[in-house]
Image: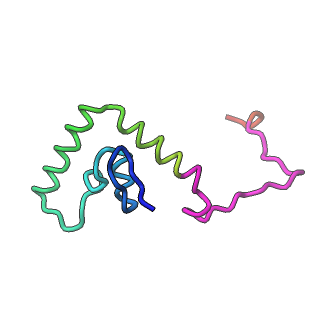
Amino acid sequence: MRAYIGGHQAVSVNDFIELALGTPPELWLGEEGETEEERAARKDAARDILADNPELPDDVARIAAEVIEAHAPELFNVVPLIRPAGRRRPSRKGAAA
């Protein structure tokens, strides 16, 4: 089975990320072994993209939150903490300031 997003074939996880963000993840994360000149050019490109699309950070945060919400147990091996029914956290209302 092939997956297409907006006419582009997504073959790997990075393809899906790039299509969701509209930019390759390496633009934001960098690449191992990049030179100072490459890093400066990458950061300049990122600044230009953010100037053209100031909503991008909010979109990325929303996408990340949706992925975490949908896949937290398998991504992070999260086990919910259950408090005993009879025990409550002490209130800070009466605490001295």
Q: Please, is residue 84 above or below residue 21 in the view?
A: below
Q: Please, is residue 95 above or below residue 18 in the view?
A: above
Residue drawn at point x = 37 percent, y = 39 percent: 57
Quadrant (top left/top right/bottom left/bottom right) for the N terminus: bottom left
- Residue 33, image x, y percentages: 19, 68
Relative to residue 96, is residue 32 drawn left or right?
left
Residue drawn at point x = 58 percent, y = 57 percent: 72
Q: Please provide the residue range marked out in magenta.
A: 68-92
Taken as a whole, is the magenta stretch helix, strand or loop?
loop
**Nearest to the observer: residue 95 or residue 22:** 22
- Residue 64, image x, y percentages: 47, 48
- Residue 11, image x, y percentages: 36, 61
Residue 60 part of the magenta segment:
no
**Nearest to the observer: residue 87 or residue 36:** 36
Occupied quadrant, residue 53? top left
Q: Which residue is most to the right?
A: 86
- Residue 91, image x, y percentages: 77, 39
Quadrant (top left/top right/bottom left/bottom right) for the C terminus: top right
Q: How many marks?
A: 0
